[in-house]
Amino acid sequence: MTTSIIPGIHLTNVYHILIDTYGELHNDPDFDPLGGLIGTILSQHTSDINSGRAYRQLVDTYPTWEEVRDAPTYKVADAIRSGGLANIKSIRIQDVLHTLMEKQQEQGGDKSLGDYLSDELDKLSSEDGWKYLQQLPGVGPKTAACVMLFNLGRNIMPIDTHVWRTSKRLGLIGPSVNANQAHTVFAKIAPPAWVYMLHVGLIRHGRQICHAQKPKCNQCPLYRECAYTGSVNPQETGIS
Ligand code: SF4
């Protein structure tokens, strides 16, 4: 695991401009990776409001993850209906819970599923924990990175559409690097302590200024950094 990364000048400039623009943002992990994983599955393809409501309904109906695992799937789907794609997400959630149960049974353990996952991840480096989560059914690199960062405070960069687009335009990752590869690139170039701020700052920047269509380059605090990497030109940005 790389723990002492010296960032390049360009990344350093981007990092400080993001802080100046959006404020210095701090992570507040709850150290509940299983709750975070279920919540992240529920958040797929819906708003935070809807997924938050679905999560609360699920834990109100079934106070333990073991009860969610053992409930009839259609009843789990009913409990999370407000989060959308309930029939798919209920199967996915129960698959994850059954897989964790089987992993623990192979080791002869009898902890709660939440404690089991926490303890397994505690044994691993951030990168290995990220890979471990991806072995669970239906868990991809972004979902695994969200759990590592937001629930455990482990500095793996989740790459969503905003982070990926803005990182490419700013030249933080190469033009042909895909979203899955970008996780690995950031692990090499970004100091761990910067990951949360970079992630949240780039999302805000993508939502507010660097839109997919017609980015507001003429209002962009990162314009100089973008010009430095050659991204700012009429063809690529739609500036007229
Ligand atoms: S200059 Fe334009 S393309 Fe570059 S980061 Fe800013 S808004 Fe995005």
Image (cartoon, rainbow, N blue to C red):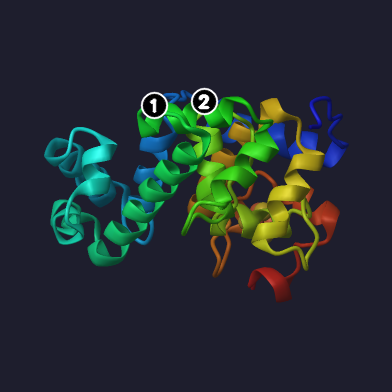
Q: Nearer the viewer, residue 91 or 240?
A: 91
Look at the image and tell me whether residue 209 can be seen: no
The percent position of residue 171, horizontal first and vertical second, equals 79, 55
Residue 221 in sight = yes
Say left or right for 132 vs 136. right
Q: Percent position (x, y) of residue 237?
A: 66, 68
The amino acid beneath tag 1 is Lys
Reading the image, the residue beneath label 1 is: 111
Pointers 2 and 1 in contact (C-beta within 8 Å): yes
Please tell me which residue lies in front, 12 or 150: 150
Which tag, 2 or 1, sits closer to the chain's start?
1
**Which amino acid does the dot numbered 2 rest on?**
Asp
Tell me: is circle 2 under 8 Å from ligand 1: no
The residue drawn where x is 69% and y is 46% is 222
Badge 2 density bin: few <14, some 14–19, many ≥20, Cα 10 Å: few
Residue placed under numbered mark 2 in the picture = 119
- Where's residue 144, x and y in %? 54, 46
Q: Mark 1: give few (<14), some (14-19) or many (20+) Cα within 10 Å.
A: few
> In this view of the protein, which residue sits in the foreground, 92 or 41?
92
Q: In the picture shown, does residue 86 fall above or below 67?
A: below
The image shows residue 105, relative to residue 161, as above or below, that is above
Q: Is residue 167 left or right of residue 113?
A: right
Q: Quadrant of the N terminus?
A: top right
The reply, left or right, for residue 225 in relation to residue 116 is right
What residue sits 81% from the left and 40% below the top?
Answer: 189
Mark 2–mark 1 Cα distance, whole angstroms, equals 10 Å
Foreground: disc 2 or disc 1: 1
Ligand 1: image quarter: bottom right
Give me the residue at 62% from left, 37% from top: 129
Q: Quadrant of residue 83?
A: bottom left
The quarter of the image holding the C terminus is bottom right
